[in-house]
Amino acid sequence: MLIVLLCALLLDYFFGEPVKYHPLVAFGQLANWLEERLNETLINIHSESKVEFSSEFIIEATNDSGSSSTKASNQNRLNGLIAVLICIMPAGWLTYAVVDEGIIGFVLEVIILYFAIGLSSLKQHAQEVLIPLVERQYEQARQALSKIVSRDTEDMDEEGICRAATESVLENGNDAVFATIFWFAVAGAPGVVIFRLTNTLDAMWGYKTERFNSFGFFAAKFDDILNYIPARLTAVTYALMGNWKNAMQCWTIQGSLWESPNSGVVMAAGAGALDVQLGGADQYHGEYKERPDLGCGQKAKPEVIQQACDLLDRSTIVWVVIIALITIPSWI
C-alpha cells in the first residue's frame, strides 16, 4: 500500500495531471450520454418544444398535477439511480477483476491511483489564479478561477477571487487527495475507482436545480456517504497542520451550517487553520446566494491561496507518514 501510494504521488509530482487521454474525460462523456437518455426533465424539455397538447389534455393534467409531479420526480430519481449504477458498478467490478497481486497488478494500482490523485493539478490551478492576481491582472485571474468554481466570477474583486480560490483548494483537497487515499487504504484500487467516479457524478449531477434536483439525488447522496469519514479526517488534518484551536472551533460552530454535510466541515476547519474569513454571499448563475461565513481572522488575500496549497502539502505528508506507520510493522 505504501509503495503504491508513494509511486502514485511521485508520478503526480513529476508529471501532474495527464493533459490528454485522461479516463475521467471519457467517463464524463459516458455520463452525459446517459443523462441525455434517462433524465426525464431534459427529455421533457426537448419533447415540449415539439409536441402540441390539446386543451382537454391540459385540463386533465392540471387536475392531477400534484400526484403526477411526485410520480415524475420519483421516476427521475430511479432513473438517476440506474444511471449511477451503470456508470460505477461495471468499472468497480472490472478493476477488481484485473488488479492481481503480481507485478501487473502493482503497476495497474499505481496507474489508477495516479490518475485519481489530483494534488499537482489542484495546486497548478491555484497558481494560475494566484500569479495574475499578484500582478494585478484581475481579468486573467477571474478567467482562471472560472475553470475551477461554479460561481460567477465576472464581477469579483480581489477578496472575492481569493476567497473562491482558497475554498476550492480546501474542498477539493479532500476530494482529489485525502478521500482518494482513504478509499485506496480501505478498499484498494476498486475503492479508488468507485469513489472518484461517484465524486465525478456528484460534480456533474449533484445540483439542486430543476434539471438535476431529482435525477442527481442519488449521485449526491452516494458522494455524501463515501465522503463522510474522509471529510472529517481531512478536517482533523487541516487543524493539526494549522491553527488547531481556531480550526476546531470553526468546525464545531460553522461546519453544520453549510449546505453540504462534508464540504462545510472541510472548509470551516481549513479556514480556521489558516486564520482566514471565507464563505459569505456569492453569485451563482446571475443570482446571489447567501452562504454561511466560514473561518475567522484576516480577510482573504493572495498569499492565503499559497498558504492553502502549503497546508495541502503538509497534510499529505501526514497521511503518508500515518500509512507508513500502519504498514511498515507488517514488513518486519
Image (cartoon, rainbow, N blue to C red):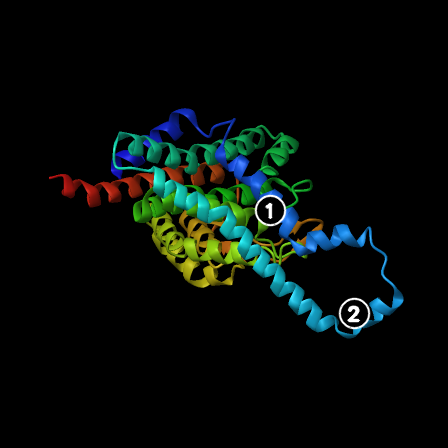
Q: Secondary structure at mark 2?
A: helix
Quarter of the image holding residue 74? Answer: bottom right
Q: Are marks 2 and 1 in contact (CB under 8 Å)?
A: no
Residue lying farthest top?
A: 14
Residue 14 falls left or right of residue 219:
left
Quick one: 135 or 27, which is closer to the camera?
27
Label whose residue precedes the other's in the sequence (2 or 1) = 1
Q: The C terminus is located in which quarter?
A: top left
Residue at figure coordinates x 76%, y 50% from the top left: 46
Quick one: 229 or 136, which is closer to the camera?
229
Quarter of the image holding residue 7? Answer: top left
Residue at figure coordinates x 69%, y 72% from the top left: 67
Which residue position holds label 1? 34
Gap in Å between the C-alphas at discs 2 and 1?
Answer: 28 Å
Q: Secondary structure at mark 1?
A: helix
> Is residue 173 at all visible to an observer of this figure?
no
Q: Decide: few, some or many residues near mark 2? Use Cα within 10 Å; few <14, some 14-19, many ≥20.
A: few
Which residue position holds label 2? 61
Give the image location of residue 307, x and y in percent: 43, 39
Give the image location of residue 229, x and y in percent: 37, 56
Compared to residue 220, the image places residue 181 above or below, namely: above
Give the image location of residue 69, x and y in percent: 69, 67
Kind of residue indicated by mark 1: Leu
Residue lying farthest right?
A: 55
Give the image location of residue 284, x and y in percent: 66, 50
Kind of residue indicated by mark 2: Ala
Quick one: 163 or 330, which is closer to the camera?
330
User: On residue 149, which mark appears?
Assistant: none
Residue at figure coordinates x 64%, y 64% from the top left: 73
